[in-house]
Each structure stands twice: as C-alpha cells, then as structure tokens.
Image (cartoon, rainbow, N blue to C red):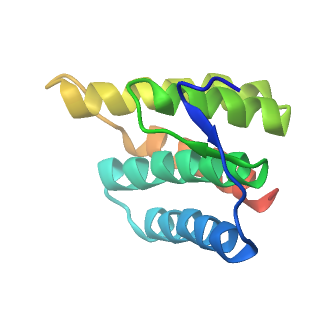
Amino acid sequence: MDKNFFSTQVFTADELEKLRKSAEKYLAISKKNREPEVKFHFTYMTLIKIGIYLIAKEGHRVKSRPGHHQIIIERLAELLKNEDVMLIGDKMRRSRNMDFYSADGMITETEAGKDFEFVEKIHKSL
C-alpha cells in the first residue's frame, strides 16, 4: 500500500458499520433524486465511500491527498477484481471534475442513471 495515500489502522466493527452505512445513506439520496447533477454527485460519492469502507476492512485509512479519489477507485477495482470499476469509476471521476471545475461539464439524466445502476450493483455485492 502506498504510504502517501494509506495509513495502517485497525477499525472496530462499529467504525466499519458507520462507514458502510454512510455509503448506504448516499446511495439512498441518489436513488430518490431525479436531478442529474445531484443523482450523479451522490452516486459518485457512494462509489468513493464503498472504496473507503472496503479499504478500511483491510486495515487501512485513506489519507486525503490530491489524487486520492483515483487511488481509491484503483484499489476498489483490485479488491472487487472488477476492471469495470476502474473504467467506469475513472470516467465518473473525470465527469465529476469537468462538472465541478469547468463551465463545459454537464451530467445527463442518462449518464446519471447508468452510473447509479452500476454503483447500486456494486453496493448490493457487499
């Protein structure tokens, strides 16, 4: 594990449960919302929170550093042994950055819906 992005930590069952429920809460917000940007934002954050949860289960805390979302997505793909997590997760990360940092970024209803379905499927597999 890259010590720039991760530190070793043992989490209690209660701490792990709180991390899992946090991802669940964001997924529920995304599911209820029809506004594409809001749906997408909470879907993306759910993906990141799932990664944080699974990394914590392995005994590591994610450090907040530039690029840490990309590292979380990469590690999540490894943990789930699912290359689609890397491909779709990175596309979501880039879309989020365009929407956040550029006036040109626009999240469509279709994109938000597909990303939600993908992340919901990952969540159900936990």
Q: Is residue 19 left or right of residue 1?
A: left
Specify the quadrant that holds the C terminus. bottom right
Residue 58: x and y in percent read 79, 47
Image location (x, y in percent) of residue 119: 63, 49
Which residue lies at the image location 56% right of the left edge and 52% below the top edge?
49
Using the rendered view, name the quadrant where residue 123 is placed.
bottom right
Q: In the rendered image of this protein, does residue 83 appear above or below residue 125?
A: above
* Residue 39 vs residue 55, the one in the foreground: 55
Residue found farthest to the right? 81
Residue 44 on image: x %, y %: 48, 45
Residue displayed at 36% across by 39% down: 108
Task: Report the residue at 74% width, 49% height from top.
Answer: 59
Q: Is residue 122 left or right of residue 91?
A: right
| Residue 82 location (% of width, % of height) | 81, 31
* For residue 57, above or below residue 92: below
Q: Nearer the viewer, residue 113 or 49?
A: 49
